[in-house]
Structure formats: structure tokens, C-alpha cells
Amino acid sequence: MTIQQIKYALVIARCGSMNKAAELLFISQPALSNTIKELENEVHITIFNRSKKGVSLTNEGTDFLSYARQVYQQFELLEEQYLNERTTVYKFGVSTQHYSFATKSFIETVKKFDTQEYQFAIRETKTFNVIRDVGDERSEIGVLFLSQLNAKVLQRYFDEYDLSFTELVDTSAYVYMHRSHPLAQKETIRFEELQDYPCLSFEQGKESSVYLAEEILSEKAYLRSVTASDRATMLNLMKGLNGYTLCSGIISEESNGDEYTVIPFCEDGEHMNTVMKIGYIMKKNHVLSEVGEEYIKELKNYLQIT
């Protein structure tokens, strides 16, 4: 049994005529009839009833072609994927912690390339997923931060997945909240002033720990806390619950809206500030693609890095 025999049988069934099928297949009617007879002898069934009015499927032939059609469809998919001339589609992916500036930079990058030639993907996700996505080469670039608290732990993950970290910018902690928040008009905010309001954070799944948190100063003891899984929900919680989160202060109003504000976190003798080093990870010795280079350029432009 061959793919060609299956194809011939499917065309005959569709046409209901040996002559019409032969015309479509650009072969003679006798040659087509002989091919089908050879197929019927091989599978030990009669596939077609033949008459002066044309041909029709037997019951056995109907069952046979139901299987044969599946085989031929799979063959066509295989042929289309590997044998037919086709346009190469390049893939570019970014995995990032929940940073609006990373999304904004991604948008500006995509604008500069033909989306018919590239498959683009951005994944705002958990910290460990950012690392794993780049390690498994699902994404070319990952965007996250290091601090004095998490650097040693994340470096072990980087080593496990053969990744390198490149710093882009460093910043201290800011309090991010809705402009209607009772503390929103203050010039700085101390830790003790936040105790009456829920501290918001992104959930990190089963790998959750203070070392994988996306929020700076995550090791501090907060009396009230609420977790969210996405940026839109986080913003709604800020507005609806007078919640806040501690972040880098690098916010895209275009992405998050202008209803929110960032206020410097004011350290005291007990609650000290710390440095948040924002950067990107990629496979060691990896040469960035053209799109990857453009994305890093857009990140630097947004972060005003020369």
C-alpha cells in the first residue's frame, strides 16, 4: 500500500467516476483502474462497486477510506512542513517579571519588525518561570532584578540553567499606590506608615519564597498582605483596597495608566532601604538575535541608559 494509491482512491471516491478521477490525476483511466485493483488485492477487500453509471464505495470501502483519509491528511501536513517551499518564520520571546517598562519596550521592538516573518511572545510570569523559560530556550531574554537578599539564591539558579545576568539599572525602593490612597500626597513614606494598609505582591506558586519575590524589601514583616497573579488585578487591588506594593519606581503610565503614583520609601534605623538591580538574563555565550539586540536597545532607551 502506498500514499499514491491512497490518494487515487480518495480522488475516485470524491468524483464518483474513474474517468473524472483520471482527468484530475493526469493519468489514463486503465492505469488508474489497475492501480486500484492492486490496492484491493493487497488489502483483500473490494473498495469500489463499478457500474456503467460510475463507481460507489462498498461498506468495506467506506471503512477503509475513513482510515486512509486520516493517513493522507497527516502526510499532507508532513509534506507542507518539510517539502513544500515555505517562508521561514523566526521566533522571539521575552519572559519577564511584572514590569510595565518591559512590556512597553517589547511593543516598541515589535513595531520595527514584520509580524509575518516573526512569531513574537512576551510572558509576564513568576520569577522562577522567567529563569526556566530562558534556560529551556523558550524565551531568548528574561527580565528580573537582583538584590542583596536574593542574589546568591538566584545565582544558583542561573548556574543550573547556564545563564548570565547583565545589569541595566539600579534603584532603591519606592511605594507604588493609587493616587486616591491616603498617603499618596506624601513626599516620602516610612515603613510604620504602611502598617494599616495591605501590602500587595505577585504570587510565586509552589516555589514561593522571599528570594523569588518580585517586590523589593520582601523579607520585612507586613501585618496585612494580599497576593495577585497579574498586573491588572494588582492595580485594581491598589485602587479598591488602598493597597500598595514596593517596587523600583520605574512605571509606564502608558501601560498602567496615570491613576497611580510612586513615592520614595524612607528608611529608618530599623527598616533600611536596599538596592534593586534590574537587568536581563540569557544563555551564556549566546549571541543575541537581531530582534534581541533591538529589545535590549529599547530597554536601555526606556531606562535612559546611554
Image (spheres, rainbow, N blue to C red):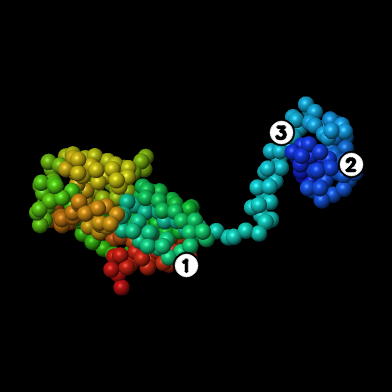
The quarter of the displayed image where residue 262 is located: bottom left
Q: Is residue 116 left or right of residue 37?
A: left
Q: Nearer the viewer, residue 239 or 266?
A: 239
Disc 1 target residue: 290
- Which residue is found at the position 30% from the left and 47% from the top? 231
Looking at the picture, does residue 9 appear above or below residue 149? above
Instruction: Pinpoint residue 146: horizontal percent, then vertical percent.
Output: 30, 57
| Few, some or many residues within 10 Å of mark 1 (<14, 14–19, 20+) | few
Q: Is residue 61 left or right of residue 245?
A: right
Query: Does dot 2 land on a helix, a strand or a loop?
Result: helix
Q: Is residue 192 left or right of residue 287?
A: left
Q: Sequence order check: which comes first, mark 1 or mark 2?
A: 2
Q: Is residue 164 visible?
A: no
Q: Sequence order check: which comes first, mark 3 or mark 2?
A: 2
Q: Sequence order check: which comes first, mark 1 or mark 3?
A: 3
Is the C terminus in the top left, top right, bottom left or bottom right quadrant?
bottom left
Disc 3 target residue: 66
Query: Does dot 1 land on a helix, a strand or a loop?
Result: helix
Q: Which mark is residue 34?
A: 2
